[in-house]
């Protein structure tokens, strides 16, 4: 029983950023989300589509990871989402004051960029495991579950 609780807690820690927090933030602060999305794309309809798509990814992929349903594919989708959001919204290279020493808004954005990539790495570990055989296993059956709550007999 303890192993199941730990497995659930680890998965909850991995997705907590998205479900409930980021998804809820998109609802509660929709105007701010639109302003941020319009920073990447100027057309409001496309910006709204990005927000809706992001909301769906955050909710449904997080739930899939939590319950273990096609969780490896869901983890791959969330990894891609983290990388895409890093490139679209954590663009430290566009800040005029990026430097490694001293005060710099660009450096703060750089850390956020790296955090997005690190979270993507965590999701990729869930999708593929820690070795090359995990990649082969995923490619053979991308919709398979990792069966996170199965307990084998000692």
Image (cartoon, helix red, strand yellow):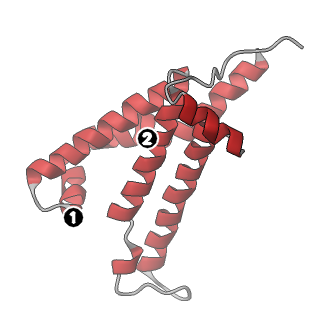
Residue at position x 62%, y 38% in the image:
136
Q: Quarter of the image containing the C terminus?
A: top right
- Residue 89 is marked as none
When asked about the image quadrant of residue 139, the answer is top right
Residue at position x 62%, y 41% in the image:
135
Percent coordinates x, y for residue 63 in the rendering: 46, 26
Front residue of 12/81: it is 81
Q: Is residue 25 above or below residue 87?
A: above
Lower sequence index among marks 1 and 2: 1
Q: Give left or right: position of 18 versus 42.
A: right
Please count the marks in the image. Answer: 2
Q: Secondary structure at mark 1?
A: helix
Q: Give left or right: position of 79 versus 28.
A: right
The residue singled out by tag 2 in the image is 77
Q: Is residue 68 above or below residue 21?
A: above
Percent coordinates x, y for residue 56 in the rendering: 31, 34
Rate crowding at label 1 as few (under 14), some (14 to 19) or many (20 or more) other CA atoms within 10 Å.
few
Q: CA distance from mark 1 to mark 2?
A: 23 Å
The residue singled out by tag 1 in the image is 39
Return the residue found at the far top.
153
Rate crowding at label 2 as few (under 14), some (14 to 19) or many (20 or more) other CA atoms within 10 Å.
many
Residue at position x 53%, y 20% in the image:
67
Q: Give left or right: position of 121 versus 41.
A: right
């Amino acid at each position: 029983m303890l192993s199941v609780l730990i497995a659930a807690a680890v998965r909850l820690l991995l997705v907590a950023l998205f479900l409930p927090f980021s998804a809820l933030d998109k609802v509660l602060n929709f105007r701010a989300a639109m302003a941020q999305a319009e920073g990447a794309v100027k057309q409001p309809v496309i910006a709204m589509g990005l927000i809706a798509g992001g909301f769906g990814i955050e909710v449904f992929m997080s739930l899939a990871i939590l319950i273990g349903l096609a969780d490896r594919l869901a983890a791959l989708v969330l990894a891609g989402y983290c990388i895409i959001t890093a490139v679209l919204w954590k663009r430290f290279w566009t800040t005029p004051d990026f430097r490694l020493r001293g005060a710099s808004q660009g450096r703060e954005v750089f850390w956020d960029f790296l955090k997005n990539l690190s979270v993507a790495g965590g999701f990729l570990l869930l999708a593929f495991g820690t070795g090359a055989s995990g990649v082969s296993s995923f490619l053979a059956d991308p919709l398979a579950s990792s069966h996170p709550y199965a307990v084998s007999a000692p």
